[in-house]
Structures are given as C-alpha cells and as structure tokens.
Image (spheres, grey):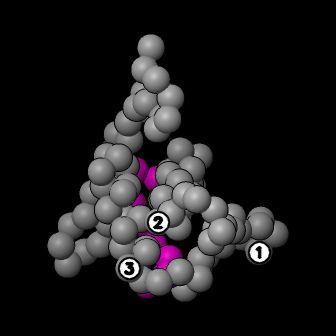
Amino acid sequence: MSDPEEPKPTLDPMSARPLYVQLADVISGKIASGELAPDRPIPSENHLADEYGVARLTARRAAQELRERGLIVTVRGKGSFVAEQPPSDAPVEGTPEA
C-alpha cells in the first residue's frame, strides 16, 4: 500500500502535542495532498495503529479529531471515508482569524 521509497512520517511520543493530534495531522496532510481522495476510505483504526505503532484507542481518537475537523465521515459498518468537500479555508489552530 505504501510506497517503499517514500519515508513514512513518524510520530513523536516525547512531543507536548498528543499522539492522536499528530496522527490526525499526518492523515490530514494525506487528504490535502490528494493521496487520500474524496469519498474513498481511509485506513482502518487497526491498520493505522499497526502502521504508526500506536494504540488502537489513539487511532480511534485521531479519527474522531478528523471528524471534528470535517475531513472524514464515518459510516457505521463500512468505515471512515474522506469527506466530499474537505474544508480548505478552515483556520489553523493557534492562529488568529483575519
């Protein structure tokens, strides 16, 4: 699934930022770059936990964070999918709105 030549972003457990936020940012970047296309599934919580070496609960909380940002939608029994129109003009956390 992943390109073996492209290095996978690593999460920093020593950072002040929670791991679930770091993981959500990684997935958000993949959505923004088009690597994860609209209306296509994102990797499962179990797959994300294995791939990034985090607990399944951390992967679940990252998915919740992405839902709150409006980047994914979750369909019970089917999984989580990239939202049709990810918000492109949403303010970045920590920056004041103009």
Q: Main secondary structure of the magenta part?
A: loop
Looking at the image, residue 55 lies above or below residue 76: below
- Residues at badges 1 and 2 in contact (C-beta under 8 Å)? no
Instruction: Give the Cα distance between marks 1 and 3.
Output: 27 Å
Residue hosting label 1: 4
Residue 49 position within the rendered picture, expressed as x and y whole percent measured from the top left:
50, 81
Dot 3: few (<14), some (14–19), or many (≥20) neighbours within 10 Å? Answer: few
Looking at the image, residue 12 lies above or below residue 49: above
Instruction: Tell whether 37 sits left or right of 52.
Output: left
Residue 56 position within the rendered picture, expressed as x and y whole percent measured from the top left:
42, 83
Dot 2: few (<14), some (14–19), or many (≥20) neighbours within 10 Å? Answer: many
Q: Amino acid at mark 2?
A: Tyr
Instruction: Give the Cα distance between marks 1 and 2.
Output: 24 Å
- Residues at badges 1 and 3 in contact (C-beta under 8 Å)? no
| SS at mark 1 in the image | loop
Residue 57, by quadrant, is: bottom left
Residue 60 position within the rendered picture, expressed as x and y whole percent measured from the top left:
36, 73
Residue hosting label 3: 57
For the question of whether residue 44 can be seen, the reply is no
Q: Amino acid at mark 1?
A: Pro
Bounds of the magenta segment: 37-49
| SS at mark 3 in the image | helix
Looking at the image, residue 29 lies above or below residue 48: above
